[in-house]
Image (tube, rainbow, N blue to C red):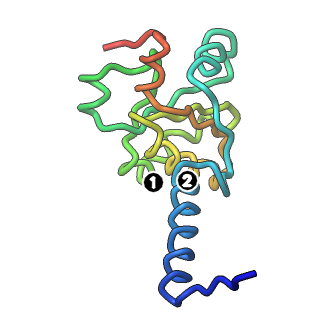
């Protein structure tokens, strides 16, 4: 049987690829997540039956206004979240569903809120997935 020999470059490339995959999984919230994930359909069901749920939109004001938003959503853009965290303290005992456009910013926001003791649920796919499922939005 022939022995396979790897160069230092091959090893470095392999390690780099592994690190990239781990980083990708981390920023998407698939690994090392301190919050739960929720589908748009499940979020919609919760909003219609559970009074103990709050929705947080972490997109920009322009996105919120122009692209529509989930009814009753509180807008705090991700870049302002740390400065405006006091606005959410009244919801510390509620479930907070966090969403953005596609699900990337909401993962970051979910990590922040979860680290501060909030009960966080990140909505997979953001408002894009919500709209694709035909769920209602407000403008």
Q: How many marks?
A: 2
Q: Find residue 9 and report its horizontal and vertical position in percent.
A: 47, 85
Callout 2: SS:
helix
Q: Taking 44 as reference, is 77 above or below it? A: below
Which mark is first along the chain, 2 or 1?
Answer: 1
Locate the N terminus and report the quarter of the image it occupies.
bottom right
Who is closer to the viewer here, 90 or 75?
Answer: 75
What secondary structure is found at the residue carrying circle 1? loop
Viewer-proximal residue, 33 or 16? 16
Residue underneath mark 1: 82
Q: Left or right of 71: which side holds 28?
A: right
Q: Residue at x 32, y 27 (%)?
A: 64
Residue 45 against residue 8 in the figure, above or below: above
x and y, in percent, of residue 27 in the image: 52, 54
The residue tagged 2 is 112
Task: Residue lying at the far right in this picture: please name it.
Answer: 1
118 with respect to 74 (left or right): right
Q: CA distance from mark 1 to mark 2?
A: 8 Å
CB atoms at circles 1 and 2 under 8 Å apart?
A: yes
- For image coordinates 42% across by 26% down, the residue present is 127
């Amino acid at each position: 049987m022939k022995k396979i020999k790897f160069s230092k470059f091959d090893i470095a490339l392999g390690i780099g690829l592994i690190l990239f995959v781990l980083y990708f999984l981390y920023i998407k919230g698939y690994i090392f997540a301190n919050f739960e994930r929720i589908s748009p359909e499940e979020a919609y069901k919760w909003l219609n039956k559970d009074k103990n749920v709050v929705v947080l939109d972490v997109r920009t004001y322009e996105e919120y206004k122009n692209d529509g938003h989930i009814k009753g959503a509180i807008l705090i853009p991700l870049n302002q979240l740390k400065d405006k965290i006091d606005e959410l303290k009244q919801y510390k005992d509620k479930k907070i569903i966090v969403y953005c456009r596609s699900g990337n910013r909401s993962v970051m926001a979910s990590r922040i809120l979860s680290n501060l003791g909030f009960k966080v649920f990140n909505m997979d796919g953001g408002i894009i997935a919500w709209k694709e499922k035909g769920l209602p939005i407000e403008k």
